[in-house]
Amino acid sequence: MKGVSVSDLRFSVIVPAYNRAGMILRALRSVLATGRDDFEIIVIDDCSTDDTAAVVEALADPRVRLLRQPLNGGVCAARNAGIDVARGRWLVMLDSDFELLPGGLDALAARCDAAPADVGNVATVCRWDHGPDTPEPTPTTSAVLDFPGYLRFVATLAVSEWFNCYRREVFATMRFPGGRAYESSFHLAASGRWRFWMCIDRVVLIHTDATNRITASPPLAFARRQLRDALDGAADADAVLRAWTPELRAHAPRMLVHYETQRVVQHLLAGHRLEALDAYLHGDAALRRSARLTGFVALGLVGPRALAYTQAFVSAQLRRRRETATH
């Protein structure tokens, strides 16, 4: 570690990777080139079928540690494996298609040093290789938010993606969701216990050149992934609504409708027709006013595949329209 003791490690940079042999070095070198020596990088190879692990090992840099997952468990399971061995005071969630911008880690260090003790996540704006910065609309001033403020902020967003740097103590009592659910439930739980600092600094550039990005998947591959992940997605939506419905109703009713919609759709994709119908009929009235969701329910009652394939093609069309509008 070039003479830096574990107690002096400011950052553990957590990098989950699956079949990213052609781009993992871009992410790692962006950290190694910062000129700092107060970090470790933990790469979690999620059972890749390409040379991702070999590329990382060939770096032969003592600041880079490689973990190999025995099975492909998804990004949240990979992050949890990295968290379990991390030694830094702050844990930086750098995906393998991200690249730190010049001076980005210095800016993040300054924010972490200035963070009040009850801030659990120092979040920063993401720059993209195409399209607008996120979150969208992009904040123009930095703000420390309590839980109601966090909910109100997220409810205003069309795109709720930002760069996360968590205080180590956050993970003393929680982890990212198990299985293949994504991290929105974790963000809610963390923001319910710790304050959230949304900073306007641009720290990372997100590249969209990976062919296995979720949003870049061909419709049929996207549909298969939806079906594979549905059980975990349904369980996660149920858990969010059990834990946070009163707060969502009070401070972010649009988010409540979003999660209730997700519960309906995920249960349909999982083949849970009765659970989906119950959630649809007894959820917010906005669910039944949505022609799109009503159509999805009809398709889901025919069968999960009909819904998954329709969703995939609708998502592909919407993505093409956004890309056309951006360019």
Image: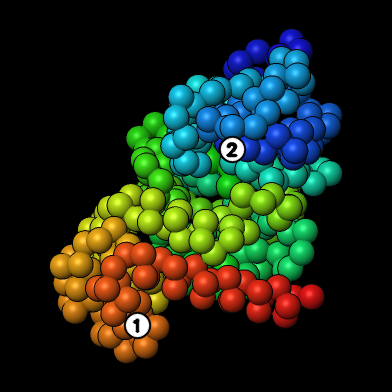
Crowding near the residue tagged with mark 1, few <14, some 14–19, many ≥20 C-alpha atoms within 10 Å: few
**Does residue 159 appear left or right of residue 225 in this picture?**
right
Q: Residue 161 at x, y = what percent? A: 58, 59
Q: Residue 93 at x, y = what percent? A: 59, 41
Above or below residue 241? Residue 47 is above
CA separation, marks 1 and 2?
Answer: 34 Å
Above or below residue 316? Residue 216 is above
**Which residue is labeled 2 in the image?**
18
- Residue drawn at x 36%, y 40% as measured from the top left: 178
Which one is earlier in the sequence, the residue at label 1 or at label 2? 2
Kind of residue at disc 1? Gly
Quarter containing the C terminus: bottom right
Classify mark 2: helix, strand or loop: loop
Kind of residue at disc 2? Tyr
Q: How many marks?
A: 2
Is the image coloured rainbow, by chain, by secondary structure, or in one colour?
rainbow
Q: Can residue 286 be spotted in the picture? A: no
**Which residue is labeled 1 in the image?**
295
Quarter containing the N terminus: top right
Q: Are marks 1 and 2 in contact (CB under 8 Å)?
A: no
Front in this rendered view, residue 40 or 292: 292
Above or below residue 243? Residue 41 is above
Classify mark 1: helix, strand or loop: helix
Q: Residue 25 at x, y = what percent? A: 76, 33
Crowding near the residue tagged with mark 2, few <14, some 14–19, many ≥20 C-alpha atoms within 10 Å: many
- Residue drawn at x 75%, y 38% as measured from the top left: 22
